[in-house]
Protein backbone atom coordinates (compact mmCIF):
# COMPACT_ATOMS: atom_id res chain seq x y z
CA UNK A 1 0.00 0.00 0.00
CA UNK A 2 3.06 2.24 -0.02
CA UNK A 3 2.31 4.18 3.12
CA UNK A 4 -1.36 4.68 2.43
CA UNK A 5 -3.55 3.14 5.07
CA UNK A 6 -7.16 2.61 4.32
CA UNK A 7 -9.21 2.91 7.46
CA UNK A 8 -12.79 2.93 6.35
CA UNK A 9 -15.06 2.91 3.40
CA UNK A 10 -18.72 3.62 3.17
CA UNK A 11 -21.50 4.89 1.05
CA UNK A 12 -22.34 8.54 1.66
CA UNK A 13 -25.47 10.04 0.17
CA UNK A 14 -26.81 8.87 -3.11
CA UNK A 15 -24.17 7.25 -5.24
CA UNK A 16 -21.13 8.55 -3.38
CA UNK A 17 -18.57 6.26 -2.05
CA UNK A 18 -16.33 7.65 0.63
CA UNK A 19 -12.94 6.23 1.42
CA UNK A 20 -11.17 7.37 4.54
CA UNK A 21 -7.47 6.83 4.37
CA UNK A 22 -4.34 7.92 6.15
CA UNK A 23 -1.23 8.78 4.22
CA UNK A 24 1.68 9.01 6.68
CA UNK A 25 0.15 11.44 9.20
CA UNK A 26 -2.29 13.19 6.92
CA UNK A 27 -5.90 12.19 6.66
CA UNK A 28 -7.24 11.86 3.20
CA UNK A 29 -10.86 11.52 2.39
CA UNK A 30 -11.39 10.27 -1.11
CA UNK A 31 -14.81 10.59 -2.60
CA UNK A 32 -15.92 8.86 -5.74
CA UNK A 33 -19.09 9.37 -7.67
CA UNK A 34 -20.11 5.89 -8.49
CA UNK A 35 -23.75 5.80 -9.36
CA UNK A 36 -23.38 3.23 -12.09
CA UNK A 37 -20.69 0.92 -10.79
CA UNK A 38 -20.67 -1.78 -8.23
CA UNK A 39 -17.26 -1.86 -6.57
CA UNK A 40 -15.74 -5.14 -5.72
CA UNK A 41 -13.06 -4.02 -3.29
CA UNK A 42 -10.57 -6.04 -1.30
CA UNK A 43 -11.86 -4.27 1.81
CA UNK A 44 -11.69 -7.32 4.06
CA UNK A 45 -8.10 -7.93 3.17
CA UNK A 46 -7.20 -4.33 3.86
CA UNK A 47 -9.01 -4.10 7.14
CA UNK A 48 -7.46 -7.38 8.22
CA UNK A 49 -4.01 -6.05 7.49
CA UNK A 50 -4.75 -3.30 9.94
CA UNK A 51 -6.09 -5.69 12.54
CA UNK A 52 -3.74 -6.00 15.50
CA UNK A 53 -4.12 -9.79 15.57
CA UNK A 54 -2.80 -10.00 11.99
CA UNK A 55 0.26 -8.10 13.05
CA UNK A 56 0.96 -10.86 15.56
CA UNK A 57 1.24 -13.31 12.67
CA UNK A 58 -2.24 -14.79 12.51
CA UNK A 59 -3.84 -15.28 9.12
CA UNK A 60 -7.31 -14.43 7.94
CA UNK A 61 -9.39 -17.50 8.93
CA UNK A 62 -8.33 -16.98 12.54
CA UNK A 63 -8.59 -13.20 12.44
CA UNK A 64 -12.08 -13.55 11.05
CA UNK A 65 -13.12 -15.94 13.83
CA UNK A 66 -11.84 -13.70 16.62
CA UNK A 67 -13.32 -10.63 15.00
CA UNK A 68 -16.67 -12.39 15.00
CA UNK A 69 -16.17 -13.07 18.71
CA UNK A 70 -15.73 -9.34 19.24
CA UNK A 71 -12.04 -9.36 20.20
CA UNK A 72 -10.57 -6.07 19.08
CA UNK A 73 -7.11 -5.99 20.56
CA UNK A 74 -4.88 -8.75 21.88
CA UNK A 75 -4.47 -8.97 25.63
CA UNK A 76 -0.90 -8.63 27.00
CA UNK A 77 -0.38 -12.40 27.25
CA UNK A 78 -1.58 -12.79 23.66
CA UNK A 79 0.73 -10.03 22.48
CA UNK A 80 3.73 -11.77 23.98
CA UNK A 81 2.89 -15.44 23.68
CA UNK A 82 1.51 -15.62 20.13
CA UNK A 83 4.72 -14.51 18.34
CA UNK A 84 6.86 -16.58 20.74
CA UNK A 85 4.85 -19.74 20.07
CA UNK A 86 4.76 -19.10 16.33
CA UNK A 87 8.55 -18.90 16.37
CA UNK A 88 8.58 -22.49 17.64
CA UNK A 89 9.96 -21.72 21.09
CA UNK A 90 9.11 -23.53 24.25
CA UNK A 91 7.24 -21.25 26.60
CA UNK A 92 6.65 -20.95 30.32
CA UNK A 93 3.99 -18.36 31.06
CA UNK A 94 2.60 -17.13 34.35
CA UNK A 95 -0.87 -15.80 33.70
CA UNK A 96 -4.04 -16.17 35.67
CA UNK A 97 -7.45 -17.10 34.32
CA UNK A 98 -9.19 -14.15 32.74
CA UNK A 99 -6.11 -12.79 31.00
CA UNK A 100 -7.00 -14.38 27.66
CA UNK A 101 -4.40 -17.12 28.06
CA UNK A 102 -6.44 -19.77 26.26
CA UNK A 103 -6.47 -17.82 23.01
CA UNK A 104 -2.78 -17.05 23.62
CA UNK A 105 -1.84 -20.70 23.10
CA UNK A 106 -4.71 -21.95 20.93
CA UNK A 107 -4.42 -19.33 18.16
CA UNK A 108 -0.75 -19.98 17.32
CA UNK A 109 -1.36 -23.75 17.36
CA UNK A 110 -4.16 -23.33 14.86
CA UNK A 111 -1.99 -21.02 12.78
CA UNK A 112 0.84 -23.56 12.65
CA UNK A 113 -1.41 -26.51 11.91
CA UNK A 114 -3.49 -24.76 9.28
CA UNK A 115 -0.35 -24.71 7.17
CA UNK A 116 0.41 -28.40 7.71
CA UNK A 117 0.82 -30.24 4.46
CA UNK A 118 0.71 -33.73 5.95
CA UNK A 119 -2.76 -35.18 6.44
CA UNK A 120 -3.35 -36.53 9.90
CA UNK A 121 -3.30 -40.32 10.29
CA UNK A 122 -5.91 -42.18 12.31
CA UNK A 123 -5.63 -42.14 16.11
CA UNK A 124 -3.04 -39.37 15.85
CA UNK A 125 -3.06 -35.83 17.25
CA UNK A 126 -0.94 -32.79 16.46
CA UNK A 127 -1.35 -31.08 19.84
CA UNK A 128 -2.28 -32.18 23.31
CA UNK A 129 -3.66 -29.63 25.75
CA UNK A 130 -3.61 -31.13 29.21
CA UNK A 131 -6.00 -29.55 31.72
CA UNK A 132 -6.87 -30.38 35.33
CA UNK A 133 -10.68 -30.67 35.19
CA UNK A 134 -13.45 -31.89 32.94
CA UNK A 135 -15.06 -28.45 32.98
CA UNK A 136 -11.88 -26.84 31.79
CA UNK A 137 -11.48 -29.51 29.10
CA UNK A 138 -14.95 -28.75 27.77
CA UNK A 139 -14.40 -25.02 27.94
CA UNK A 140 -10.97 -25.00 26.30
CA UNK A 141 -12.18 -27.31 23.53
CA UNK A 142 -15.15 -25.02 22.92
CA UNK A 143 -12.70 -22.12 22.51
CA UNK A 144 -10.57 -24.17 20.09
CA UNK A 145 -13.67 -24.96 18.03
CA UNK A 146 -14.69 -21.30 17.96
CA UNK A 147 -11.26 -20.09 16.89
CA UNK A 148 -10.93 -22.91 14.31
CA UNK A 149 -14.35 -22.22 12.83
CA UNK A 150 -13.01 -21.03 9.47
CA UNK A 151 -10.27 -23.66 9.21
CA UNK A 152 -10.45 -27.38 8.48
CA UNK A 153 -8.82 -28.23 11.80
CA UNK A 154 -10.52 -30.57 14.24
CA UNK A 155 -10.60 -30.77 18.02
CA UNK A 156 -12.12 -32.84 20.79
CA UNK A 157 -12.25 -32.99 24.58
CA UNK A 158 -11.48 -36.22 26.45
CA UNK A 159 -12.27 -36.41 30.14
CA UNK A 160 -13.28 -38.97 32.71
CA UNK A 161 -16.66 -39.65 34.31
CA UNK A 162 -18.25 -40.51 30.96
CA UNK A 163 -18.16 -43.52 28.67
CA UNK A 164 -14.86 -43.94 26.77
CA UNK A 165 -16.48 -45.44 23.65
CA UNK A 166 -17.59 -42.20 21.93
CA UNK A 167 -14.20 -40.63 22.63
CA UNK A 168 -12.39 -43.66 21.17
CA UNK A 169 -14.58 -43.59 18.12
CA UNK A 170 -13.95 -39.92 17.58
CA UNK A 171 -10.19 -40.52 17.76
CA UNK A 172 -10.23 -43.14 14.99
CA UNK A 173 -9.91 -40.50 12.30
CA UNK A 174 -7.37 -38.51 14.30
CA UNK A 175 -7.91 -34.98 15.66
CA UNK A 176 -5.65 -31.98 15.32
CA UNK A 177 -6.08 -30.70 18.85
CA UNK A 178 -6.98 -32.91 21.78
CA UNK A 179 -7.90 -31.29 25.09
CA UNK A 180 -7.74 -33.87 27.86
CA UNK A 181 -7.59 -34.52 31.56
CA UNK A 182 -4.62 -36.68 32.60
CA UNK A 183 -6.44 -39.80 33.82
CA UNK A 184 -8.62 -40.22 30.77
CA UNK A 185 -5.75 -39.49 28.44
CA UNK A 186 -3.69 -42.30 29.99
CA UNK A 187 -6.70 -44.62 29.78
CA UNK A 188 -7.11 -43.91 26.09
CA UNK A 189 -3.39 -44.36 25.48
CA UNK A 190 -3.38 -47.70 27.38
CA UNK A 191 -6.30 -48.86 25.29
CA UNK A 192 -4.32 -47.91 22.17
CA UNK A 193 -7.08 -45.57 21.09
CA UNK A 194 -4.48 -42.87 20.66
CA UNK A 195 -0.84 -42.64 19.53
CA UNK A 196 1.48 -39.73 20.13
CA UNK A 197 4.02 -40.26 17.34
CA UNK A 198 2.75 -37.29 15.33
CA UNK A 199 2.40 -34.95 18.25
CA UNK A 200 4.12 -31.62 17.70
CA UNK A 201 3.03 -29.52 20.65
CA UNK A 202 2.26 -30.28 24.27
CA UNK A 203 0.44 -27.67 26.34
CA UNK A 204 0.10 -27.90 30.09
CA UNK A 205 -2.65 -25.53 31.17
CA UNK A 206 -3.12 -24.49 34.79
CA UNK A 207 -0.02 -26.42 35.80
CA UNK A 208 -0.21 -25.25 39.42
CA UNK A 209 -3.70 -26.61 39.70
CA UNK A 210 -2.56 -29.91 38.22
CA UNK A 211 -0.01 -30.13 40.99
CA UNK A 212 -2.63 -29.26 43.64
CA UNK A 213 -4.91 -31.97 42.33
CA UNK A 214 -2.18 -34.60 42.53
CA UNK A 215 -1.55 -35.10 38.81
CA UNK A 216 2.24 -34.88 38.94
CA UNK A 217 2.76 -38.65 38.49
CA UNK A 218 0.28 -38.78 35.63
CA UNK A 219 2.01 -35.86 33.93
CA UNK A 220 5.33 -37.69 34.11
CA UNK A 221 3.72 -40.84 32.72
CA UNK A 222 2.36 -38.79 29.83
CA UNK A 223 5.58 -36.90 29.11
CA UNK A 224 7.58 -40.11 28.60
CA UNK A 225 5.12 -41.26 25.96
CA UNK A 226 5.52 -38.13 23.82
CA UNK A 227 7.98 -37.71 20.97
CA UNK A 228 11.12 -35.92 22.14
CA UNK A 229 11.09 -33.45 19.33
CA UNK A 230 8.15 -31.29 20.26
CA UNK A 231 7.25 -27.82 21.42
CA UNK A 232 6.30 -27.45 25.09
CA UNK A 233 4.07 -24.74 26.45
CA UNK A 234 3.37 -24.43 30.16
CA UNK A 235 0.79 -22.05 31.59
CA UNK A 236 0.35 -21.52 35.29
CA UNK A 237 -1.32 -18.94 37.50
CA UNK A 238 1.48 -19.17 40.03
CA UNK A 239 5.06 -20.29 39.75
CA UNK A 240 5.77 -22.72 42.55
CA UNK A 241 8.71 -25.09 43.02
CA UNK A 242 6.52 -28.01 41.99
CA UNK A 243 5.59 -26.27 38.75
CA UNK A 244 9.26 -25.49 38.11
CA UNK A 245 9.99 -29.20 38.60
CA UNK A 246 7.45 -30.07 35.91
CA UNK A 247 8.98 -27.47 33.59
CA UNK A 248 12.33 -29.20 34.16
CA UNK A 249 10.84 -32.57 33.34
CA UNK A 250 9.81 -31.05 30.03
CA UNK A 251 13.22 -29.62 29.41
CA UNK A 252 15.00 -32.89 30.23
CA UNK A 253 13.16 -34.62 27.47
CA UNK A 254 14.00 -32.05 24.83
CA UNK A 255 14.46 -28.34 24.84
CA UNK A 256 17.00 -27.14 22.38
CA UNK A 257 16.40 -23.43 22.86
CA UNK A 258 15.90 -21.77 26.19
CA UNK A 259 12.19 -21.50 26.86
CA UNK A 260 10.69 -18.05 26.59
CA UNK A 261 9.48 -16.89 29.99
CA UNK A 262 6.47 -14.64 30.13
CA UNK A 263 4.93 -13.37 33.30
CA UNK A 264 1.75 -11.45 32.83
CA UNK A 265 0.31 -10.87 36.24
CA UNK A 266 2.63 -10.70 39.19
CA UNK A 267 1.08 -13.38 41.35
CA UNK A 268 0.51 -10.95 44.20
CA UNK A 269 -1.95 -8.86 42.29
CA UNK A 270 -5.53 -9.59 41.47
CA UNK A 271 -7.10 -8.09 38.35
CA UNK A 272 -7.52 -4.36 38.95
CA UNK A 273 -11.07 -4.31 37.65
CA UNK A 274 -12.33 -6.42 40.55
CA UNK A 275 -13.81 -4.58 43.51
CA UNK A 276 -13.11 -6.62 46.63
CA UNK A 277 -14.68 -6.28 50.01
CA UNK A 278 -15.44 -8.40 53.03
CA UNK A 279 -18.08 -8.64 55.72
CA UNK A 280 -17.23 -10.11 59.08
CA UNK A 281 -19.92 -12.39 60.41
CA UNK A 282 -20.55 -15.13 62.97
CA UNK A 283 -20.55 -18.64 61.56
CA UNK A 284 -24.14 -19.32 62.62
CA UNK A 285 -25.53 -16.26 60.84
CA UNK A 286 -23.56 -16.66 57.61
CA UNK A 287 -26.29 -18.21 55.49
CA UNK A 288 -28.84 -15.67 56.78
CA UNK A 289 -26.43 -12.86 55.87
CA UNK A 290 -25.96 -14.27 52.38
CA UNK A 291 -29.72 -14.55 51.84
CA UNK A 292 -30.12 -11.00 53.13
CA UNK A 293 -27.48 -9.66 50.69
CA UNK A 294 -29.01 -11.52 47.75
CA UNK A 295 -32.49 -10.16 48.40
CA UNK A 296 -31.70 -6.70 49.82
CA UNK A 297 -29.18 -5.84 47.15
CA UNK A 298 -31.21 -7.60 44.45
CA UNK A 299 -28.17 -9.48 43.14
CA UNK A 300 -28.66 -10.44 39.53
CA UNK A 301 -26.22 -13.30 39.77
CA UNK A 302 -23.60 -14.82 42.04
CA UNK A 303 -21.08 -17.63 41.98
CA UNK A 304 -20.73 -18.69 45.61
CA UNK A 305 -17.68 -20.64 46.71
CA UNK A 306 -17.63 -23.16 49.53
CA UNK A 307 -14.80 -25.43 50.64
CA UNK A 308 -16.48 -28.82 50.84
CA UNK A 309 -19.04 -30.66 48.78
CA UNK A 310 -21.36 -31.29 51.72
CA UNK A 311 -21.37 -27.58 52.56
CA UNK A 312 -22.48 -26.86 49.00
CA UNK A 313 -25.59 -29.02 49.35
CA UNK A 314 -26.28 -27.61 52.83
CA UNK A 315 -26.03 -24.00 51.66
CA UNK A 316 -28.34 -24.63 48.70
CA UNK A 317 -30.92 -26.06 51.13
CA UNK A 318 -30.55 -23.05 53.46
CA UNK A 319 -31.00 -20.59 50.60
CA UNK A 320 -34.00 -22.46 49.26
CA UNK A 321 -35.60 -22.42 52.71
CA UNK A 322 -35.47 -18.65 52.46
CA UNK A 323 -37.09 -18.69 49.04
CA UNK A 324 -33.89 -18.24 47.00
CA UNK A 325 -33.55 -20.70 44.18
CA UNK A 326 -29.96 -21.97 43.96
CA UNK A 327 -28.12 -25.04 42.78
CA UNK A 328 -24.64 -26.47 43.17
CA UNK A 329 -21.76 -28.06 41.34
CA UNK A 330 -19.21 -30.16 43.18
CA UNK A 331 -17.20 -33.34 42.76
CA UNK A 332 -20.02 -35.45 44.21
CA UNK A 333 -22.42 -34.71 41.34
CA UNK A 334 -22.42 -36.51 38.03
CA UNK A 335 -20.81 -34.92 35.00
CA UNK A 336 -24.19 -34.67 33.26
CA UNK A 337 -25.70 -32.92 36.26
CA UNK A 338 -22.80 -30.50 36.58
CA UNK A 339 -23.09 -29.63 32.91
CA UNK A 340 -26.82 -29.12 33.17
CA UNK A 341 -26.52 -26.82 36.19
CA UNK A 342 -23.70 -24.90 34.57
CA UNK A 343 -25.70 -24.37 31.40
CA UNK A 344 -28.61 -23.08 33.46
CA UNK A 345 -26.29 -20.66 35.23
CA UNK A 346 -24.72 -19.50 31.98
CA UNK A 347 -28.09 -18.91 30.37
CA UNK A 348 -29.26 -16.91 33.37
CA UNK A 349 -32.03 -19.37 34.19
CA UNK A 350 -30.20 -20.13 37.44
CA UNK A 351 -29.00 -17.03 39.26
CA UNK A 352 -27.12 -18.41 42.23
CA UNK A 353 -24.59 -21.17 41.82
CA UNK A 354 -22.83 -22.68 44.82
CA UNK A 355 -19.58 -24.38 43.87
CA UNK A 356 -16.52 -25.93 45.41
CA UNK A 357 -13.23 -24.45 44.23
CA UNK A 358 -12.24 -27.58 42.34
CA UNK A 359 -15.54 -27.93 40.49
CA UNK A 360 -15.58 -24.27 39.57
CA UNK A 361 -12.06 -24.38 38.25
CA UNK A 362 -11.85 -23.04 34.73
CA UNK A 363 -15.52 -22.18 34.38
CA UNK A 364 -15.82 -19.47 31.81
CA UNK A 365 -19.00 -17.63 32.42
CA UNK A 366 -19.18 -14.49 30.33
CA UNK A 367 -19.71 -11.25 32.21
CA UNK A 368 -19.97 -12.76 35.65
CA UNK A 369 -20.63 -9.78 37.87
CA UNK A 370 -20.13 -11.24 41.31
CA UNK A 371 -18.33 -13.97 43.21
CA UNK A 372 -18.79 -14.70 46.87
CA UNK A 373 -16.36 -16.48 49.15
CA UNK A 374 -18.79 -18.09 51.53
CA UNK A 375 -15.80 -19.99 52.85
CA UNK A 376 -12.41 -18.37 52.50
CA UNK A 377 -9.96 -20.64 50.69
CA UNK A 378 -6.89 -21.97 52.50
CA UNK A 379 -4.52 -20.83 49.79
CA UNK A 380 -4.14 -17.14 48.88
CA UNK A 381 -3.63 -18.19 45.26
CA UNK A 382 -6.99 -19.90 45.29
CA UNK A 383 -8.55 -16.63 46.43
CA UNK A 384 -6.99 -14.88 43.46
CA UNK A 385 -8.24 -17.61 41.12
CA UNK A 386 -11.72 -17.40 42.49
CA UNK A 387 -12.08 -13.69 42.22
CA UNK A 388 -10.58 -13.98 38.73
CA UNK A 389 -13.93 -15.51 37.71
CA UNK A 390 -15.31 -12.00 37.67
CA UNK A 391 -13.90 -8.83 36.13
CA UNK A 392 -12.65 -10.88 33.18
CA UNK A 393 -10.98 -9.36 30.15
CA UNK A 394 -11.69 -5.82 31.24
CA UNK A 395 -15.27 -6.22 32.56
CA UNK A 396 -15.84 -4.98 36.09
CA UNK A 397 -16.93 -7.26 38.88
CA UNK A 398 -17.11 -7.59 42.62
CA UNK A 399 -15.78 -10.20 44.99
CA UNK A 400 -17.34 -10.43 48.43
CA UNK A 401 -15.95 -12.55 51.23
CA UNK A 402 -17.96 -13.55 54.30
CA UNK A 403 -15.38 -13.94 57.02
CA UNK A 404 -15.86 -15.45 60.47
CA UNK A 405 -13.30 -15.81 63.22
CA UNK A 406 -12.30 -19.29 62.06
CA UNK A 407 -11.18 -17.74 58.74
CA UNK A 408 -8.78 -15.35 60.45
CA UNK A 409 -5.61 -17.26 59.58
CA UNK A 410 -6.66 -17.61 55.94
CA UNK A 411 -7.61 -13.95 55.78
CA UNK A 412 -4.17 -12.91 57.07
CA UNK A 413 -2.47 -15.06 54.42
CA UNK A 414 -4.66 -13.62 51.66
CA UNK A 415 -4.19 -10.02 52.71
CA UNK A 416 -0.45 -10.50 53.04
CA UNK A 417 -0.39 -11.94 49.53
CA UNK A 418 -2.44 -9.00 48.24
CA UNK A 419 -0.11 -6.69 50.19
CA UNK A 420 -3.24 -4.88 51.22
CA UNK A 421 -6.21 -5.25 53.50
CA UNK A 422 -9.57 -5.93 51.88
CA UNK A 423 -12.12 -3.20 52.52
CA UNK A 424 -14.55 -4.17 55.30
CA UNK A 425 -18.24 -3.37 55.19
CA UNK A 426 -20.88 -3.75 57.86
CA UNK A 427 -24.40 -4.93 57.26
CA UNK A 428 -27.17 -3.65 59.47
CA UNK A 429 -28.94 -6.33 61.43
CA UNK A 430 -25.87 -8.60 61.54
CA UNK A 431 -23.83 -7.56 64.57
CA UNK A 432 -20.77 -9.75 65.11
CA UNK A 433 -20.27 -11.47 68.44
CA UNK A 434 -16.83 -12.84 67.65
CA UNK A 435 -14.97 -9.98 66.00
CA UNK A 436 -12.32 -10.75 63.38
CA UNK A 437 -9.21 -8.70 64.18
CA UNK A 438 -7.31 -6.75 61.52
CA UNK A 439 -4.55 -8.82 59.97
CA UNK A 440 -0.94 -7.99 60.45
CA UNK A 441 0.40 -7.52 56.93
CA UNK A 442 4.01 -7.45 58.12
CA UNK A 443 3.93 -10.82 59.82
CA UNK A 444 6.57 -13.19 58.41
CA UNK A 445 6.16 -16.94 58.78
CA UNK A 446 8.95 -18.51 60.87
CA UNK A 447 9.82 -20.90 58.06
CA UNK A 448 10.40 -18.08 55.56
CA UNK A 449 12.55 -15.89 57.79
P1 LIG B 1 -9.10 -16.95 29.58
O1 LIG B 1 -8.10 -16.17 30.38
O2 LIG B 1 -8.46 -17.70 28.47
O3 LIG B 1 -9.96 -17.81 30.46
O4 LIG B 1 -10.07 -15.89 28.83
C1 LIG B 1 -10.96 -15.07 29.51
C2 LIG B 1 -12.06 -14.51 28.64
O5 LIG B 1 -11.55 -13.45 27.83
C3 LIG B 1 -12.72 -15.47 27.67
O6 LIG B 1 -14.10 -15.30 27.81
C4 LIG B 1 -12.26 -15.05 26.30
O7 LIG B 1 -13.26 -15.29 25.33
C5 LIG B 1 -12.03 -13.57 26.48
N1 LIG B 1 -10.95 -13.03 25.63
C6 LIG B 1 -9.77 -13.62 25.32
N2 LIG B 1 -9.03 -12.83 24.54
C7 LIG B 1 -9.73 -11.69 24.34
C8 LIG B 1 -9.48 -10.48 23.62
N3 LIG B 1 -8.34 -10.28 22.96
N4 LIG B 1 -10.44 -9.54 23.64
C9 LIG B 1 -11.58 -9.73 24.31
N5 LIG B 1 -11.90 -10.84 25.01
C10 LIG B 1 -10.97 -11.81 25.04
Image (cartoon, helix red, strand yellow):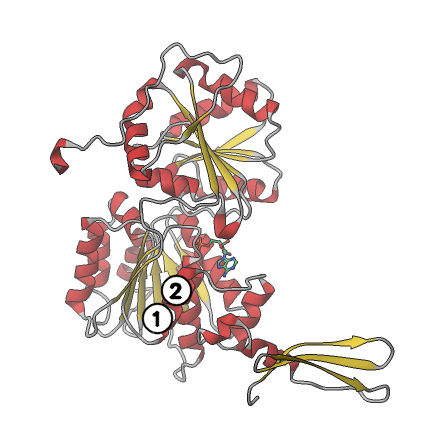
Q: Nearer the viewer, residue 27 or 389?
A: 27
Return the mark for residue 85: 1
Secondary structure beneath dot 1 equals helix
User: Image quarter for residue 420?
Assistant: top left
Secondary structure beneath dot 2 equals helix
Q: Is residue 16 left or right of residue 307?
A: right
**Pointers 1 and 2 in contact (CB under 8 A)?**
yes
Q: Nearer the viewer, residue 79 or 365?
A: 79
Q: Position of residue 146 (x, y in %)?
A: 53, 63
User: Image quarter for residue 87?
Assistant: bottom left
Q: Position of residue 93 (x, y in %)?
A: 31, 59
**Residue at image x 21%, y 70%?**
258
Q: Is residue 95 left or right of residue 294?
A: left
Furthest-front residue in this view = 26
Furthest-top residue in this view = 433
Q: Is residue 171 visible?
A: no
Amino acid sequence: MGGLYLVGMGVRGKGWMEINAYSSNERLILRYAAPLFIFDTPYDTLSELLMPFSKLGLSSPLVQAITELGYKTPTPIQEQAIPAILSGKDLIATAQTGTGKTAAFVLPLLEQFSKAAEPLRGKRIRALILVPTRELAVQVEASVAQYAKHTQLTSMAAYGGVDTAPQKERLIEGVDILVATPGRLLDLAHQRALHFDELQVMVLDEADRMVDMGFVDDIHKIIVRLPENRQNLLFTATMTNDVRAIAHAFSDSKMTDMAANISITPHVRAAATIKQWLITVDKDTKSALLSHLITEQAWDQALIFVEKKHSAAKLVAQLEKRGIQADSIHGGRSQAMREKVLDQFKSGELKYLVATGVAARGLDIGELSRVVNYDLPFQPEEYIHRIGRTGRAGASGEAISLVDISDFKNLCAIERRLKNTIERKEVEGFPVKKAVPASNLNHVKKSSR
